[in-house]
Amino acid sequence: MLKKAKAGHYAVGQFNINNLEWTKAILQTAQDLNSPVILGVSEGAGKYMTGYKTVVGMVNGMLEEMNITVPVALHLDHGSYEGCLKCVEAGFSSIMFDGSHYPIDENVEKTKELVKIAHDNNMSIEAEVGSIGGEEDGVIGKGECADPEECKMVADLGIDFLAAGIGNIHGKYPDNWEGLSFETLDSIQQKTGDMPLVLHGGTGIPEDMIKKAIDLGVAKINVNTECQLSFAAATREYIEAGKDQEGKGFDPRKLLKPGTEAIMATVKEKMELFGSVGKA
Ligand SMILES: [Zn+2]
């Protein structure tokens, strides 16, 4: 999926899921736009949904019942070593091992073991070099730039795609953010050849920077916070308009509808920006 994206100069969006509404909204949008899609699950979200087996059951059920025919990957986002093993067992199609907080030798060692396990199970695996700033499930990074030599070392372990810090951070970007380091991205891409690169923290990166990053070899872009913000805003609007108190407006299927539609709009906007529409 991502090799094709890199060769075609577009990126596939990874949209993190939290529950049924999120999953349904993202899958439906991908199908409507004929776009490949990656469903991301953080360890925290996995726990929230009662465990990885529930997630696999829900996603596989929806693929069938919603007649989803576009390529869909179910991917563990920022997994620990143990979390990766659990997702292999539960039936995910892809995992990310985030060993960026380990010294590089230990990151390499653990990534190597997980590459073998993932490939033995026909799964793809993403690794991370240079921690990505902001906070993701309690993991706090500063937004440093990865060392291109270390990227090459990890890329050569047989991983399928590589997340490298290039000044990007998770969550909302601060006003004094210095922007993406295209110089770093360019040298990583030159050292890692046709390895698809991953851009985390897609919320709030200006569109021209996203496009330039895709030109320089980014084939997967992670979006999480932006769907949360649009869901929250639409739900707030519904409640503030008093619609939950009109008729059966309190019915969760009605109450959660504006938020679900807002996620669909955000996903559509991102797929158009990333160029993945019609690429299924
Ligand atoms: Zn991330």
Image: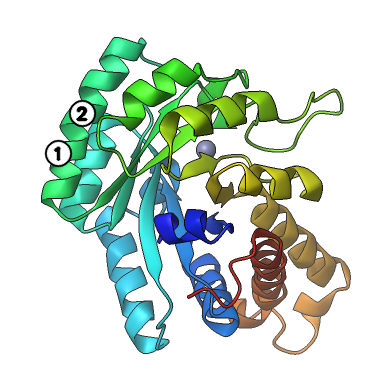
Q: Is residue 251 left or right of residue 30?
A: right
The residue at the point 14 percent across, 41 percent down is 117
Picture coordinates of residue 95, whole percent (x, y): 32, 46
- Foreground residue among 270 and 28: 270
Residue, disc 2: 112
Q: Residues within 10 Å of mark 1 (few under 14, many from 20)?
A: some
Within the image, what quadrant is residue 250 found in? bottom right
Label 2 sits on a secondary structure element that is helix
- Foreground residue among 123 and 211: 211
Disc 2 to disc 1: CB gap under 8 Å: yes
The residue at the point 45 percent across, 53 percent down is 40
Residue, disc 1: 116
Within the image, what quadrant is residue 162 found in? top left
Q: Is residue 152 left or right of residue 207?
A: left
The answer to whether residue 134 shows anywhere in this view is no
Circle 1: residue type:
Lys
Q: Is residue 78 above or below residue 220?
A: above
Picture coordinates of residue 163, whole percent (x, y): 47, 35
Circle 2: residue type:
Lys
